[in-house]
Structure formats: C-alpha cells, structure tokens
Amino acid sequence: MKKGPESRAYTLTAPGNLVESDPDTNSNNGTSVREKDIRPSPRELENVPLKTSTETSRKKLCGYLNKLGIKGPIKTWKSRWFFYDENKCRLLYYRTAQDINPLGSIDLSSASFDCKMENGEGVFEIRTLSRAFTLKAINKQAMMYWLQQLQMRRWEFCNTQSRFPVGSSQLVNEPLAGRTNVVDNEDFLPLVKTPTEAVGLKAASLPAPQTSTALQNISLKHPWTEIQNTVYNICGSKQFWGSNENVFSFDEFQEHPENVDEEQEAEGAVKEETLEDGRMGPRLNWIRKARWMNSGFPGSEELSREKNSVDKVSVLQQQILTLTEEVKSQKELVKLLHKALEAAQQEKRVSSMYLTAAEDKDRLELVRHKVRQIANLTSRLEALEQEKKELEQILTLRDSHIHELKEHVQLLMEKNHAKQEVIMTLTEQMARELSDPLQEANTITVETLYKQQEEIEHLKDDIDAYKTQNQFLNSEIHQVTQLWTSVAENEKALLMKCACLQARNCQMESKYLTVLRKLQEAVPGLPNSHAELVKNLIQEALQWDVKEEAEEGFNLNPVSEYDEYGFMTVPDYEIEDWKLLAKIQALEIKSNKLRSQEIVEKPLRDRWNSIGELNPSAELKSLIRSGIPVEHRQRVWRWMVSRHCSPVPGHYQRLLGQSRSTEHPACRQIELDLPRTLTNNKHFSSPTSQLIPRLRRVLLAFSWHNPAIGYCQGLNRLAAVALLVLEDEESAFWCLVYIVENLMPADYYSETLITSQVDQRVFKDFLSEKLPCLMAHFEQYRIDVSLITFNWFLVAFVDSLVSDILLRVWDAFLYEGTKVIFRYALAIFKYNEEEILRIHDSVEIYQYLCFFTRMITDGRKLMNIAFNDLNPFPMKLLRNRRSMHREELEAELCELEQIKAAYVKERAEQGPQDLEEVVSEEEEES
C-alpha cells in the first residue's frame, strides 16, 4: 500500500536518525514498519532506547543552537546540534546532526532558565547546579520556543519522578494526592508556534551553520569523540559513494513496504556478524547510510519535490560547499594527528635502539645522549620562558602605549566632534538667516517629529521585549515554586514516615531489653546453659552505643550523649543490674521524641513563635504547662522572675565584693556541696568544670543576701539549674532569690525545716484523697513516703526526673508556684501506681521508689495526669491545710521541747550521785 506525501511523518529518535512513521502500516505491537526498518547502531542502542508508537508520534525537541565556549579570556560561539533525551531529562549536544556520540549533556531536572534582553537577541541561559550554559537561537521566536518546550519537558519529568511506587505508605502518598497530574493553568506565556526552519526535522535536513574558520567549530575538549564521529562519517561516506555512481541517485533507496521483512533479515544477519567480530560490517554501514540518505540527508526532500533543474543545481552546489568545508576541517585534524604520530615514531626508534644495543656501554651512551637532549630541551625551555616573559613585558608596555594612544585619539575625536558641532551650529544659523523663517520652522518641526517617531518605535519594541521577558520569568518562577513545594511536601512526608518507623523500632528494642531485664531477674532459677545465654545477650545489649548507632545511618532525632543543657541522656548507674535499665530509658526517650516531634512539638513551637510581648493569660498558662521550647525558655524565665522580684542594680556585685573580703560561715559547707551538684551534667561533673566557679559565687552572694538562711543543702541544685538555663550569674542569683523568698513558704530552708515537714503531712493528706488504694498499700507495708518525697519538695525534683521532664515542671513551677510540686508529686505516684501495687514486700517497695522517677519518659502523659486526670485543688485549700498541720507540728515540737527540758533537768539533778556511783564501781574493780 503506497502512501502519499501528506500521510508520511518523520520522527527523530536520536541525533542524525530520522524515522518515517505511518499509522496505516503499524504492526501488532504498536511499532511502525518504517521504525522497525530503520534501527540505530549498537552504539546508539546503548544510549537511545526504542520508542513505542505513542512516544515516537510525539514531536521530538531538537535543532541547531550556538553554544558559548570559554577558553580563558577567549569567548567564541560554536554551532551545536541539540537533542532532548526524555528518559533522563538531559539536553545532549553534538557538533552536527549526523554524529553518533554526544560532546556533552545538560541535566535539566534541577536546572533553571533565564533570558535577558540586554544579552542580545536569541540569547538565553540554562543554570544547573554545577555551571551555567549560554545558548543562542537564530531569532527571538526560536529562543522562546526552546525555553517554553524545555519548561514543559522539565515539568513532565519532575512530576513523573516525584510519584511514589505502588504500595507505599498512605502517610507518604496522602500529601501528594491530586498533585501528580497538576496542570499549570496560569497563562503567563502564550504557546509559541514551532519555528520549523530552526527546530525539528527541517533543521535536521539543512546543513549545519558554518563558522568563520574550519577548526573553530571543533571541540578541543573532546578529541576522542570528534575522532570517532569523524571516522564514522568518513567510513560511511566512502562505502556509500563506492557502491553508487551517483551519490544523489535515490531511486535505489526508495521505500518498499513489501520488502521490509527481507531488509530486516539482512540487517539482523549483519548485527550478528557485528556481535561476533566486534566490528561493524560494511553491509550494515551501507544500509544505515543509504537509509539516512533517503530520509534525512541534506537536500533529499527538496530534490524529491523540486522539479526545476536550476533549483537542484543550487542545492547541489550548497552541498558541495558544505562537504568542502568539512574536508578542510578534517585535513587540519589529520595534520595534527600526523605530527603526534611522528613524535611517537621518533620515540619508538630511540627506544628500539636502546633495546637492541649489544653492550651496556652502548646503552649507557644512548642514555647519556638522551640526558643531553633533555638538558638541551630544558635550557631551550628556560630560554623560551625568559623570552616569553620579555615578550609579555613588551606586550604590557605596548598595551599601555596603545591605551594612551586610544585616549589621545578619543580626545582628538571629542575635539573634532566639538568643532563639527560648532560648524553645524554656524551653518544652521547661516541657513536660517538666508532662508525663509516659516519654511525653516516647518523643516525643523518635520525633522523633530520624525526623530520622535523613531524613538517611539524603538521604545515600543523595547516594551514588547521586556513584556515577553517578564512573562517568561513569571512562568519560570511559578513552575520552580511548584516543583519546590512538591519536593518539600514529599520530603516532609518521608521524614514523618521515617520518624514513625524509628519510633516503632525504638519501642521494639525497648521491649526486647525489658524482656532481657525480666530474664536477668530470673537467672538464678534458670539452667546453666540458659543462664549463660541470657548473660551473653545482656552483655551484647550493654555494648550497644546510642551515639555509634546514630552515626551509622540516617537518624532524625538521635539520642546524643548529652542534651541541650548538658544532662546525660543515658544515666550512668553504678549498679550493674541498672545499666540495662538505662538503655531502656534512652530508647523510651527517643521513641517519645520521635512520635511527638511533628504532631505535638512543631505546632507548640509555632504557637510560641507567634507570641510577642508576654502578658499573664490563660493561653500563656496553658502553653507554659505544655513546656517552653529551648529557644524561648531563657526569655520566659527572665520575665517570670522579673514580675515578682525586681533586680536591684549593683546589688549582686556588692555581695560578691563582701564575700571576697569576708569569709562566710557557710563557705565550708558550700565547698563540700559543689562537687556533689548535678553529677549527671557535664558542666558540673568535675571540679574543673566551667560552671563550678560561677555556682560558688552565686551561693556565696545569696548567703550574704539572706543571713537568716545563709546556706542550706539543696540550694546548690536550685542555683545550678538556674545557671544552666539563664547562663548569666546575676540572673541565676535573682532566680534563686525569687524561688526561696517568693515561691516557697517562709522557713522552708531554715535550720528546723519546719515548713518542709508541714508540706510532707499535707502531701500525705492529698495522697490519701487522690490515691486511696496506693496509700492503703503503703500503710499495709508501713512505708513512709516522706523519706522519698521530702527531697522532691526541697529541690523541686532536681536529680529525680529526667532533664526534659524536670525543666517542664520548672516552667510551670516558676509561673504558678508550689502547688505545681504537689500536682506532679501526685502524678508521679499515679503514673506508677499499678507497678507499685504489684510489689508485696516493704524492702522491694523502698528499692523501687528510689529510682522509679527515672523510669518516667513520657512527659506529655505525666503533664496530663497532673493537670487534667487528677481533680485539681485550689491554692486556698493548700494554704488551709498548711496552716492546720503547722499548728499541729508546732504543738508537737513544743511538747518535745518540754520533754527535752525535763529530761535535761532530771539528768542534771542526778549528775553528782551518778558520778559517785561510777567512782565506787571503779574502785571495786581495782
């Protein structure tokens, strides 16, 4: 079945290969007969995959562009054939459309495009991550077509690559729903028509644009690629010309659809021969060259359609000129290769003489001759270097002289221009005097109007150009923003998925370690083999290091050795049985942080970022209870301290001066307590730590500031936490003053600690009301909880809770007062109530209560128990309970004082009689 010209379409599958496709002659698998017939070479099969009919029917993006090449200070435009590879989103460029190997490529997947009108007509830029490529089209329409098509291809490739594979997590695919098929509806730039004379098939059939010199268009960066392309073109041309009397006789290569199978069999045989011999047979070259000549050889389409012999002759002359220029460039290249070959042959002859020398003496003479040659060449090189320097100096002097001459010429030109202006002015003046005044005015008006019209036309052209540039840049910004948003959403979804997976992994590891701990407790009752296996597993678990694991792979929220304030994230327990417990605690902390990172922490941090000036409110109270982010904690703490305790300027410095001049009685006790302060914090862990001297100064200043208290054990921990957060000594001092004198009741840190004892009785009352089962359990086994909780109240849970939860407790404590300590103390027992009720031995209960606060890792859960689950109690109720128990305690203390006084009096009266009895007993013994 024959096809007319209107039904025949050509598709470019690779640079230099034009494929003729026809929907009427498609095979069963959707590939056209012509596409089957014309196949690329094995080298091309590696780079250009076969396309289906739907892909080949789409218009390929290809054409000639000028590429700006930079060699040091020299910039030249070189003509290159550009071809877009849809599979890799790369723009390949060749020297001509008939080359088989590209000179290079441009990655468009992460590139941006730009055009500036001031660079010149048709000039645009492609900026990649590594470099910027400057290209030039033949006109403005071709430039806009290339830019618009590259934008569209980049958008399609990025949308295709951004999709997740089938079966991915719903959490990842959810943000991408409805985004993969986004169509840019923003009409920034209207669709540019295809410039067929500059882009596509017609451009491929035309000869390549010529340069001023033969070697200017050759790529010196890729000599091997140039040689391959040249050899391929020369060999293909020779074989083709040798098999035909007339190279432009196309009758022998016309399309014959009925002989397609025979041609495929012949070509298949040639391909087998190629695979066996490793070389391309002449028959395959002949077939490929003949098909290329028939489908895409320059001028073939014009020759088949033009009937005028004159036009045919002109086309042939153009082809002759093209081939002549190509031969010239190839001759230049061959000359260069001949010179390199002669040098290699000379080196080979010298090496052969050295190898064929019979005696060592002859060889030594050859070596000496070579050394002399090297010395001569070195001296010649030095002389040439010296000559080069002298020439450079001469050139510099000549450049300066030329510059001076140019300035002188410019000055003369300006003088000449001024003289010409004077002459023109005088001439116009004389003309006005000699001519009619009205006619002169009309002439001037017409000339001025003509110039203004020209300026207006130029301005209109500039406006149109800038409008086009603005439209393209808007479309580029819009598309890049959409791509960036899509990538950001994908990255966020992946991070959330990774966080969930890591949290789940930490939970599994924590459960595994918990099972090992249970087995560790049951080791005495296990057989020897099982006990040995359990010990080995525990030893492997103890060798696991959180820091090393974080360095091995990608970790969203790694548990480092220390947190933001220097606290150890994994406690260093001295007891061997508790080391496994420390690992479990670290995993639980990491799991909780990962789970709350995106769901809780990020929204909370956004709310804190939106707060400007701090003012007391219900919203601020709720935010403080949820925990203050690290970046805002210092500012909020300073604000809370300054609300109730106004710092006196210079007061802290005066106290420091007093402590330096006079030694305080509590100085010795302070020195004893400094090494025992926050031993799990790197800033206080050793006597040489940086915060130890600052803590000493704060405690000494407070002992002089409040002589009634002076110093009490526990104040060192309060001041240390204030120093870690506030960082400034004076701010930490006033924070300590605020806690002791404003938040805590009076006599809380006195010698008798009477108020501290009162709070323990009040807490027992609340414990009986809020947790009656737990209190009954304590009473059953005679457990005095004040032995555990007394230190909680005295130092506000310092050294009892993990650092993250401790600082959240302090956030609410500094804002609301001591009732927060009661709330959290009750919440801690509620958090572990079920575990405590399972223990039925008083010793084991005491052992569990000594460290159970360290096992609390979920701060959100503890906060909800403290402020939501337990029925709240107002501050008024707390004051009433304190007053009642204080009266009872004072009465008990008064009674004890009376008993003590009576006992002392009785001992004083019995003293002499007892002394006589003791003496008599000694005499009897002697």
Image: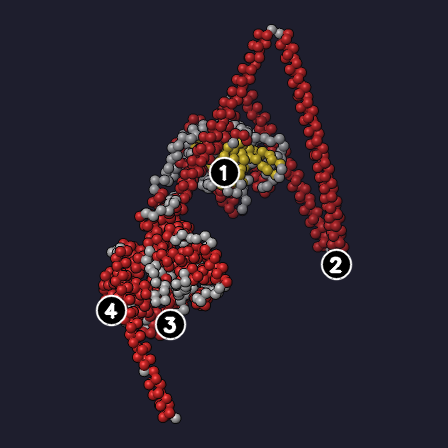
Residue linked to disc 2: 360
Residue linked to disc 3: 532
Q: Amino acid at mark 2?
A: Asp
Marker disc for residue 779: 4
Residue linked to disc 1: 91
Question: Gap in Å between the C-alphas at discs 2 and 1?
Answer: 60 Å
- Residue at horizontal 74 percent and vertical 40 percent from the top: 390
Q: Dot 3, how many residues are within 10 Å of its Cα: few (below 14), some (14-19), or many (20+)?
A: few
Nearer-N-terminus badge (4/1) = 1
User: In the rendered structure, are the residues bearing label 4 and label 3 in contact, judged by CB atoms less than 8 Å apart?
Assistant: no
Residue at the top extreme of this rendering = 436
Nearer-N-terminus badge (4/2) = 2
Asked whether 757 or 216 is in front, the reply is 757
Marker disc for residue 184: none
The answer to which image quadrant residue 791 occupies is bottom left
Question: Gap in Å between the C-alphas at discs 4 and 3?
Answer: 40 Å
For the rendered model, the colour scheme is secondary structure
Viewer-nearest of labels 4 and 1?
Answer: 4
Q: Dot 4, how many residues are within 10 Å of its Cα: few (below 14), some (14-19), or many (20+)?
A: few
Question: Gap in Å between the C-alphas at discs 4 and 1?
Answer: 83 Å
Picture quarter with the N terminus: top left
Picture quarter with the C terminus: bottom left
Residue 140, relative to residue 582: is it above or below? above
Viewer-nearest of labels 2 and 1?
Answer: 1
Nearer-N-terminus badge (2/1) = 1
Q: Dot 2, how many residues are within 10 Å of its Cα: few (below 14), some (14-19), or many (20+)?
A: few
Asked whether 627 or 141 is in front, the reply is 627
- Identify the element where label 3 is drawn: helix
